[in-house]
Amino acid sequence: MTTQEFLGKQNFKIHTKTVSESCPSNIALIKYWGKYENQIPANPSISYTLNHCKTNTSMEFLADENFAVQTFLAGHEEVKFAEKIEKYFKNIEQYIPWILKGKYIIRTENTFPHSSGIASSASGFGAIAKCLMKLDEEFSGNTSEEESLRKASFLARLGSGSACRSLYNGLVVWGASDEVEGSSDLFAVKYPDSKIHEVFKNFNDWVLLIHEGQKSVSSTVGHGLMNTNPYAERRFQEARENFVPMKQILKGGHMEHFIKLVEHEALTLHAMMMMSDPAFILMKTGTMEVINKIWEFRKQTGLPLFFTLDAGANVHVLFPKDASEEKIKIFIETELLQHTQNNGVVKDVMQF
Ligand code: PMV
């Protein structure tokens, strides 16, 4: 279908507007895994927002009595994605009253490879929510930047939970925690820069693409399986408790404790998958090889190289941007890249 055919003949006064926004992906350090109705997280989470892994989205809105959505991913029309967005827009109508009063053409592309297995839902829904807030300003009048970001985070959460953290840079918290002032289950908040030691403000995240393509079990199904997981309550409690040491670690710059906590969180996430019914494993042989080599390297050199995982086989390799980084980069290139599918690596940074 061409764009013209989609828009059809307009017999009444129209209001068109095109907005564009960009939003990065994020990687959780304390993980969100398990949720209640309306995308309420079972426990608080904290993530680093990335810099290079982004989604760029343009949204063309044409006022119309009929509601319709057409989407293009990297230039190709995607009907399934359009259906998902239609459902999402219907769901958030209560928060954006004009949202169903028109037709949309949404063009979106990721700066990271499409088949990489890097979750694009966080950056994707983040960018869509930002576009909606830009249109909302146009139609409903000005809101402060702070309010607009908060509402974008709120809306992004309803699309894909972890997306709400992508609206802010640096370290970001989603889910109510006694340890983080202003934190909420409904939207994300920036973790205060003044409470973060300098050593954590300049970090590399190299994403090793161990397995490109679709995951065998989606995040939606994975979250759902926490409902019947006998270890779920303990896990939610542990994640809540982990905010206590995390807060001290971030303030004090305790790298060794940070490494231990972040790796523990990653392995716990995957342990939960293995203890689900039915059980599933998203790690691949390459994931295990990389983890073992990282541990061995750390034992031999004492250098701060460690990992985290999202809900997939890829390994996020983390190391500070400091004097040790060159040695670590050489190790990754010579020892770890061989475990990726096509020498695939996305070299990202967290800088703020
Ligand atoms: O936002 P979702 O539904 O894609 O779930 C994300 C879950 C993890 O990436 C595994 C953890 C997290 O907190 O981002």
Image (cartoon, rainbow, N blue to C red):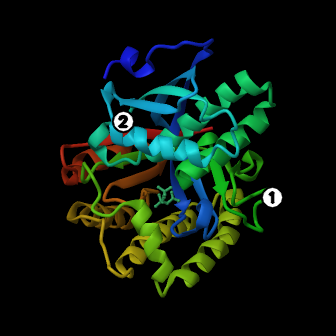
Q: Earlier in the sequence, mark 2 or mark 1?
A: 2
* Local crowd size for mark 1, using a 10 Å CA cut-off: few (<14), some (14–19), many (≥20): few
Q: Quadrant of residue 99?
A: top right
Position of residue 180 in the picture relative to residue 314 (left or right)? right
Residue type at mark 1 is: Glu
Q: Is residue 189 above or below residue 9?
A: below
- Residue under the point 62% across and 41% down: 167
Q: Amino acid at mark 2?
A: Phe
Left or right: residue 66 compared with residue 194: left
Look at the numbered disc 2 and give the secondary structure of its residue. Answer: loop
- Considering the image in quadrants, where does the N terminus appear? top left
Determine contact: label 2, label 1, CB under 8 Å: no
Task: From the top left corner, tell me how far across and down residue 299 is, in percent.
Answer: 37, 67
Query: Does the beta carbon of the residue at mark 2 sit less than 8 Å from ligand 1?
Result: no
Residue at 62% x, 79% y is: 237
Classify 179 as above or below 59: below
Q: Residue at x 51, y 64 (%)?
A: 262
Q: Quadrant of the C terminus?
A: top right
SS under mark 1: loop
Residue identified by numbered label 1? 181
The residue that appears at 52% across and 42% down in the rendered structure is: 125
Q: Nearer the viewer, residue 349 or 3?
A: 3
Q: Closest to the observer: 282 or 62?
A: 62
Q: Position of residue 59 (x, y in %)?
A: 52, 25
Q: Which residue is mark 2?
A: 112
What percent of the width, then of the height, locates residue 229? Answer: 46, 83
- Position of 338 compared to 215: left or right? left
| Res 84 → quadrant | top left
Q: Is residue 94 visible?
A: yes
